[in-house]
Image: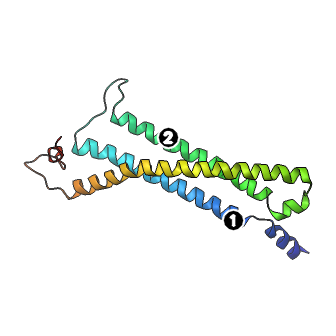
Amino acid sequence: GCFECCIKCLGGIPYASLIATILLYAGVALFCGCGHEALSGTVNILQTYFEMTRAAGDVIDVFTMIDIFKYVIYGVAAAFFVYGILLMVEGFFTTGAIKDLYGDFKITTCGRCVSAWFIMLTYIFMLAWLGVTAFTSLPVYMYFNLWTICRNATVVDGANLCLDLRQYGM
């Protein structure tokens, strides 16, 4: 009856793909949220402690670059959202229940090619993601260090200065 139908339906769910998709979305959300927070905090620190303002006109300044990086983060999040859906659909179509239903040689050969393509693409994305992580972790680390320094700094001679770059020869 109904119980057997539910068990059969639950047997066709690719739980590994479902968990991997949830982990992918959690990682992208974490990357997007932390990147946005770090970039917004950097703008706040630059305006508060270094008295920098946006340049008038079409000049590319630090604030424009920060806005561009924010849009890049949003684009990466959207692209990985779509890629996660594609991987989940591919996971559903390569389960044993689908293979039993559509077990022709041509269909399974096409499925193997699609699976191999997604595995290769996922491996390339993993390497690219490691590069993005290495590239973006340093500015986030610098932001949190600067934020900690500026939060704990004492006001010197009434100036709103938390970091003196002369310490570093600049």
Q: Tell me the residue that label 2 is attached to.
A: 72
Q: Which mark is residue 131?
A: none
**What count of labels does the image hold?**
2
Q: Residue furthest left?
A: 157
Q: Is residue 168 left or right of residue 139?
A: left
- Residue 67 image position (x, y, % from top left): 42, 38
Amino acid on which disc 2 is placed: Val
Q: Residues within 10 Å of mark 2 (few under 14, many from 20)?
A: few
Mark 2 or 1, nearer chain start? 1
Q: Residue at x 85, y 70 (%)?
A: 8
Q: Tell me the residue that label 1 is attached to.
A: 16
- Disc 2 from disc 1: Cα separation: 29 Å
Amino acid on which disc 1 is placed: Ala
Foreground of the two, 39 or 113: 113
Q: Residue furthest top?
A: 57
Q: Which corner quadrant holds the C terminus?
A: top left
> What SS does tag 1 mark?
helix
